[in-house]
Image: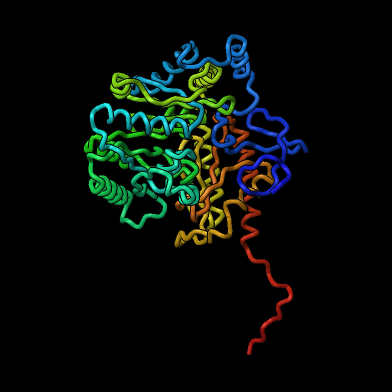
C-alpha cells in the first residue's frame, strides 16, 4: 500500500496525469500517452474539447442541478428525444442515471415492476451469459458472469441463471452455425428448466466488452435469443453501456443485427468522459404499465440533472456534426487491418475480433491448441505495462470467466485520425516485440557443450 488516502485495485504506483488533448495525455514528467482505450472505453470524443466545455459552461451559467421530482429541464427533454430518435422510436421512454451500473439496476427493477404490475409476481429470475459484465452494484453483479468479481458476494446477490455465450475462437463444434444452434438449445433448456413463468428477462451485451475481449455474439445468436424471449414471454435487455453511442460504428450495436430489445441501457460514451451520465431506454407500453400501477419505485439523486443532460446533448451533436459514425467505421477498418498484421507475426496472438473502434486481442500460450497462458503469469498485465512504457494505453482483462485467458482491448476515441491510428499501431508493435522477446528464453551462455560420440 502507498501513503495515499486513495485506494482502488492493488498494483504499482501510477503516474500523475498533467493534461490531455485529443487522443493524447501527458503525465507530470512530460511523457505522452496515446489513449488507445478511451480511458475505460468512455472518452469517445477524446480530451480537451472546447465545444463540450462551452456547452457545459453555458448550462452551468443557467442551472447545474435540479431534482427530478421538482423541475423538468430542457436539456433532459431534448436528450431523451434524441435517444428515442436514435433507436427509430422503437424504444419510446428514457430514464436517466449517472453510470452504467445504475442503468443496469434501473433496467432490472423496471422489468420486475412491469411483471409485478401485470399480476405476475412469480417472475423473479433473469438469464445472462457466462462470461459477462453488467456492473459492480449488487443487482448488476448478480447478472455478471466473472468469477473473481462474484466470489466475495455470491451469498448476497440474487444471481441470474448463467448460460454460455458464443465463442467463435475456441468452440469445438463442426462450424459456427452448429455452435450457435447448440448454445441456443442450451439456453432454451435452461430457461425451460427454470420455468418460463419464473423468468423476467435475458440480459446480454450485443458485443462483449471487458469480460470477453470484444467477443462477438453474431446475428444468428442474438436473433435466436430474441425469439426465445418472445417464446417464454420475458424481456430482452440489451446492455450497451460500453457499445452504445457510436462505439461500434452504429449508434447502438443491436442495430448491426436488426434486433430490437425491450429495454436498452447505455452510459460511458453518452457523457464521453466529460460528465457522468447513463440512460435506460424502454418500450413505451412497459413504462406505461408501470406508471399506471403507482409509478416507477426507483430513482437516483442526480438522475437527469441539467448539466449531465446538456453534456450528453453536446456529445451526440458532435458525433452527428463530425460524421463520427463514418469515421469510426473507416478507422476501425484501418485498425483491424493493422492488428491482424501484427497478429501474423506472433504465435501467441490467438484471436483478433471486434467492430468499429472496439477491438480485442486474445493471447495464447500455444497457437495450435489455443491453450491459454497459466493464470499466475499475468500476461495481460505484462503486455499492458509494456504498452504503457511505449506511450500507449490499452485495457486488459481475462477472457475465460476471469480465471484464465489473457486479452486486451484497443478502443481509441471515435475522433482518432488515420495518422494517429498509425502511431497507435507503431507503439503497440514495439510493446508486442518486447513482450515476444520476454517470452523467448535467453540462451544459457554458461552451459557446457555436449560431446557427440
Outermost residue to the top: 62
Asked if residue 261 shows in the view, the reply is no
Q: How is the image coloured?
A: rainbow
Asked if residue 59 shows in the view, the reply is yes
* Residue beneath the point at 50% across and 44% down: 360
Count numbered badges in the picture: 0
Q: Is residue 205 above or below residue 245?
A: below
* Residue beneath the point at 46% across and 59% down: 370
* 276 left or right, relative to 291: right
Q: Is residue 371 above or below residue 132?
A: below
Residue in front for this viewpoint, 98 or 381: 98
Picture quarter with the C terminus: bottom right
Give the image quarter of residue 239. top left
Outermost residue to the right: 29
Q: What percent of the width, then of the height, locates residue 279?
A: 45, 26
* 385 left or right, relative to 113: right
Q: Is residue 218 above or below residue 378?
A: above
* Residue beneath the point at 58% across and 56% down: 378
* 380 left or right, relative to 244: right
Q: What percent of the width, then of the height, locates residue 297?
A: 38, 25
* Residue beneath the point at 46% across and 47% down: 153
Q: What percent of the width, then of the height, locates residue 229?
A: 27, 37
Outermost residue to the bottom: 453
Residue in front for this viewpoint, 53 or 156: 156
Q: What percent of the width, then of the height, locates residue 102?
A: 47, 31
Amino acid at each position: 500500500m502507498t501513503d495515499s488516502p486513495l485506494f482502488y485495485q492493488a498494483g504499482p504506483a501510477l503516474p500523475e496525469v498533467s493534461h490531455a488533448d485529443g487522443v493524447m495525455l501527458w503525465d507530470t514528467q512530460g511523457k505522452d500517452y496515446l489513449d488507445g482505450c478511451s480511458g475505460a472505453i468512455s472518452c469517445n470524443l477524446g480530451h480537451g474539447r472546447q465545444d463540450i466545455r462551452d456547452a457545459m459552461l453555458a448550462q452551468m451559467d443557467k442551472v447545474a442541478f435540479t431534482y427530478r421530482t421538482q423541475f423538468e429541464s430542457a436539456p433532459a427533454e431534448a436528450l431523451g428525444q434524441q435517444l428515442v430518435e436514435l433507436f427509430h422510436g422503437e424504444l419510446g421512454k428514457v430514464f436517466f442515471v449517472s453510470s452504467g451500473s445504475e442503468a443496469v439496476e434501473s433496467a432490472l427493477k423496471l422489468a420486475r415492476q412491469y411483471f409485478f404490475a401485470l399480476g405476475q409476481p412469480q417472475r423473479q429470475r433473469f438469464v445472462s451469459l457466462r462470461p459477462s459484465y453488467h456492473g459492480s452494484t449488487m443487482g448488476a453483479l448478480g447478472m455478471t458472469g466473472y468469477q473473481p468479481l462474484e466470489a466475495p458476494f455470491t451469498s448476497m446477490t440474487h444471481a441470474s441463471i448463467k448460460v454460455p455465450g458464443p465463442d467463435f475462437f475456441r468452440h469445438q463444434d463442426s462450424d459456427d452455425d452448429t455452435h450457435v444452434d447448440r448454445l441456443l438449445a442450451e439456453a432454451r433448456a435452461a430457461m425451460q428448466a427454470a420455468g418460463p413463468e419464473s423468468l423476467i428477462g435475458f440480459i446480454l451485451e450485443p458485443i462483449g466488452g471487458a469480460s470477453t475481449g470484444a467477443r462477438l455474439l453474431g446475428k444468428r445468436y442474438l436473433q435466436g435469443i430474441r425469439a426465445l424471449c418472445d417464446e417464454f414471454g420475458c424481456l430482452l435487455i440489451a446492455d450497451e453501456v460500453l457499445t452504445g453511442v457510436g462505439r461500434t460504428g452504429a449508434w447502438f450495436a443491436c442495430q448491426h443485427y436488426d434486433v430490437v430489445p425491450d429495454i436498452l441501457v447505455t452510459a460511458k460514451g453518452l457523457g464521453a468522459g466529460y460528465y457522468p451520465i447513463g440512460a435506460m431506454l424502454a418500450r413505451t407500453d412497459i413504462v406505461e404499465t408501470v406508471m399506471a400501477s403507482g409509478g416507477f419505485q426507483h430513482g437516483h439523486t442526480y438522475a437527469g440533472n441539467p448539466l449531465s443532460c446538456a453534456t450528453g446533448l453536446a456529445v451526440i451533436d458532435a458525433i452527428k456534426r463530425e460524421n463520427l459514425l463514418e469515421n469510426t467505421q473507416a478507422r476501425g477498418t484501418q485498425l483491424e487491418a493493422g492488428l491482424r498484421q501484427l497478429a501474423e507475426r506472433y504465435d501467441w496472438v490467438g484471436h483478433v475480433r471486434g467492430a468499429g473502434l472496439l477491438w480485442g486481442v486474445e493471447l495464447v500460450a500455444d497457437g495450435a491448441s489455443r491453450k491459454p497462458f497459466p493464470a499466475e503469469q499475468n500476461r495481460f498485465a505484462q503486455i499492458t505495462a509494456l504498452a504503457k512504457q511505449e506511450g500507449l494505453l490499452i485495457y486488459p482483462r481475462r477472457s475465460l470467466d476471469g480465471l484464465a485467458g489473457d486479452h486486451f482491448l484497443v478502443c481509441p476515441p471515435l475522433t482518432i485520425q488515420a495518422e494517429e491510428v498509425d502511431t497507435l499501431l507503431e507503439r503497440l508493435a514495439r510493446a508486442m516485440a518486447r513482450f515476444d522477446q520476454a517470452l523467448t528464453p535467453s540462451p544459457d551462455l554458461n552451459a557446457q557443450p555436449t560431446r557427440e560420440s
